[in-house]
Amino acid sequence: MNDIRRSLLRRDSLSAAKQVLYHLDILFGGQLQKSATPVVDNETAELVEEFVFSLPKERSAPRQMTSLQELQLLEVMCSYFQEQGKDSLRQAIFSALFSPQGNVADGRRQSMLGKLVSMAIAVCRVPILNCTASWMQKSPTHQCMRLAKVLVEDYCGSVPGPSQALRDIITVKDLVPPSDLLEMVVAWVQDDSQLTLLTFLSAPTPTSRPPGSLDPTPLLGLIRWCVKAPLAYRRHRKSPPWGRSPARDPRAADGHTGPLFSRLHLCVLQILVSVREHLAERHLFGRLGVLPLEGVAKLAGELVRLVDDEADPRDKDSDGAAETELALNRLAQALQ
C-alpha cells in the first residue's frame, strides 16, 4: 500500500483521486467474487480520505483540488456510477466513499456527497440516486438532514425569501415550506404514494416482532406539515398590532398553498389506509403502529404551543378558532 501511496503522491490531485477510484474498483471487484460483503481496510480508507477528500496524512501538506478539478472529479464519479453495470460493486464503492467514519474527514465527505447528488439530480443519474437511497437508510439522521438541506438550497433557492424558510424546514420550526418545495412533494406523493413506504414495502415480513411502530417513514413529517400549516400560515400573514388585517379562511390561506396542503393531507390519509391493508396482508395489523407514539406526542405538544401563541386576550378576533379547528381535524383524521 505504501507503493500505491508513493505513486499517487507523484500525480496531480485529480489524477490521484481517479486512480483511487480505479483501485477501489479492482479491490472490491475481487472481494465480491469471494464474499457478498466487501471489507474496506484501514489503509484503503486512508487513501480515500487523503486523495479523494484532500485530508492530509500526518504532517504532510494538504493536496487541495481547484474548483475545476473538483468539478471534473464529480463528472468522473457520475460517469463511473452510471456506467458500472454491477450494482453490488457500485453500492460497495459508494459506501466506501461516503459512509460516515466518525472522523474529521466526514465534513469533506458530506460536502462532496451533496455536490455529487445534486449533479446526479440535474443530469438524471439514477444509479447514483439509488446508491444515495441506500446510504440514507444506513446513515445517522443528522447526516441525512445535511444532505437534504443541500438539495433544498440547490433546487428551491429561487423561492422569494428562501433562506429563512429553508432553515425552518431543516430545524422543523413552526413555519411552512417554500411553495415550490411543497408543490414538488405533493406531486411526488400524488404520482406515487408508495414513495413514502419504500422501506416498509421492501422489508421482509418479520416472523416475530414486539409491539412497536413501522421503520422510519416520511409520514409523520408530512402529517406535521399538514396539521401545523393553518396556524403557521396565520402567523405569517398577521399584521403588526397597529395595522392588523382581518382573519381569513384558512382553507384559502395565501390562495395557493392552502389547496396544496389540502391535497397533501388527502394523500396522506389515503396512504394511511393503504398501510393498514398492507399490515393486514402481512398479519401485522394490531402488532405494529403506523406512527411512533413519541412523534405523535411531540406533534401534539407543538400544536398546543402554536394555539397558545396565537391566543391574544386583547383581541377577541385573534384566537384563530377556524385555523385551530382545521389543524385539530387534520390531526384527528390522521390518528383514526
Image (spheres, rainbow, N blue to C red):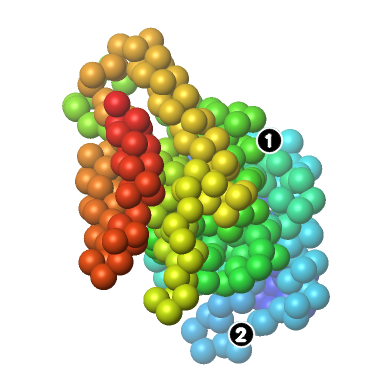
- Which residue is the site of mark 2? 62
Q: Residue at x 45, y 70 (%)?
A: 244
Amino acid, disc 1 = Lys
Q: Quick one: which residue is furthest to the left in this view?
A: 210
Residue 307 seen anywhere in this rendered image of the structure: yes
* Placement of the N terminus among the 4 image quadrants: bottom right
Horizontal side, residue 138 vs residue 75: left or right: left
Return the residue nearer the eye: 76 or 143.
143
Q: Label 1 neighbourhood size at 10 Å, few (<14), some (14-19), many (20+)?
A: few
Return the residue nearer the eye: 83 or 254.
254
Q: Label 2 neighbourhood size at 10 Å, few (<14), some (14-19), many (20+)?
A: some
- The spot of residue 26 in percent (x, y) is 67, 49
Q: Quadrant of residue 247?
A: bottom left
Q: Residue at x 29, y 52 (%)?
A: 303
Q: Residue at x 34, y 36 (%)?
A: 329
Number of numbered discs overlaid on the protein picture:
2
* Placement of the C terminus among the 4 image quadrants: top left
Return the residue nearer the eye: 310 or 222.
310
Circle 1 sits in a helix, a strand or a loop, which is it? loop
> In whole angstroms, how far apart are the C-alphas of marks 2 and 1?
34 Å
The image shows residue 81, relative to residue 151, as above or below, that is above
- The spot of residue 311 in percent (x, y) is 27, 62
Q: Residue at x 25, y 48 (%)?
A: 300
- Which residue is the site of mark 1? 86
Amino acid, disc 2 = Pro
First of labels 2, 1 by sequence position: 2
Residue 10 seen anywhere in this rendered image of the structure: no
